[in-house]
Image (spheres, rainbow, N blue to C red):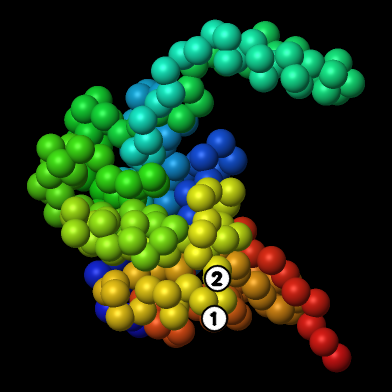
Amino acid sequence: MTALAERLGTRWPLIQAPMAGSQGSALALAVSGAGGLGSLPAAMLAPDALRAELQKLQASGRPYNVNFFCHTPPAPDAAREAAWQQVLAPYYRELGVDPAAAPAGPARRPFDEAAAELLAEFRPPVVSFHFGLPAPGLLARVKAWGAFVLSSATTVREALWLQEHGADAVIAQGLEAGGHRGHFLSLDVSEQSVGHLRPAAAGGGRRARAGDCRRRSPAPRRASRPGAGRAAGAVGTVTCAPTRR
């Protein structure tokens, strides 16, 4: 067990990466039940839906993580919206997609006062963020109940900023990680950040032998595994590599 796993209260130094739009509390509960840290993506959940999911996680008595975004939503721009929809119009027709059916407004909400107030009712043990950290006042509210704060970084400079501004641990997000802003090269992630950060978790570029996948054992094999200078691994999807005979 690594020091970070001990702090998170998990058996294994594995954090399930939150995947907004494709998972809910069921996956987080399964991961926490198996000894890792299950994560709930909250950026796309309305307050009532978030409350319902938090109630399920809280009732389990197991450690869990709730994840939010910290981006600044873009200002509405009707002309820009019309321009890119015009460019994509041939594909809409080809695929039978009605752009008017898409929900209006941003799909992911940044962490705000309302989210902090709701979260305080449940006091989750771990709270994580993408795209930086919330405003100092909001971050202080999260830390007030003893939450362990994680945030993802894609460069050493960003990771150091997070560390200096209140992140308890940094997820060094690799190039392959979940479609976010990956600038780390996963094979070099330890070399780039080791010595600068403590503790840190590596995210992106997980592989497992075919036999491991059949056994549902997502054991990381690349250099970004916890034993290669990292305190934990953040795992979303696992690439199953054929076993050579």
The image shows residue 71, relative to residue 62, as above or below, that is above
Q: Is residue 240 left or right of residue 125?
A: right
Dot label at residue 186: 2
Q: Residue furthest bottom?
A: 245
Number of marks in picture: 2
Q: Is residue 161 left or right of residue 66?
A: left
Q: Where is residue 84 drawn, in percent x and y?
A: 67, 19
Check disc 2 and give the amino acid type: Ser
Q: Nearer the viewer, residue 137 or 192?
A: 192
The residue under the point 72% across, 70% down is: 240
Q: Is residue 41 left or right of residue 178?
A: left
Disc 2 + disc 1, Cβ < 8 Å = yes
Q: Secondary structure at mark 2?
A: helix
Check disc 1 and give the amino acid type: Ala
The residue under the point 22% across, 34% down is: 116
Q: Nearer the viewer, residue 54 or 47?
A: 47
Q: What is the quadrant of residue 23 in the picture?
A: top right
Quadrant for the N terminus, please: bottom left
Quadrant for the C terminus, please: bottom right
The image shows residue 63, relative to residue 46, as above or below, that is below
Q: What is the quadrant of residue 244 in the picture?
A: bottom right
The residue carrying mark 1 is: 223
* Mark 2 residue crowding within 10 angstroms, few (<14) / some (14–19) / many (20+): many
* Mark 1 residue crowding within 10 angstroms, few (<14) / some (14–19) / many (20+): some
Q: Where is residue 32 drawn, in percent x and y?
A: 43, 60
Q: Secondary structure at mark 1?
A: loop
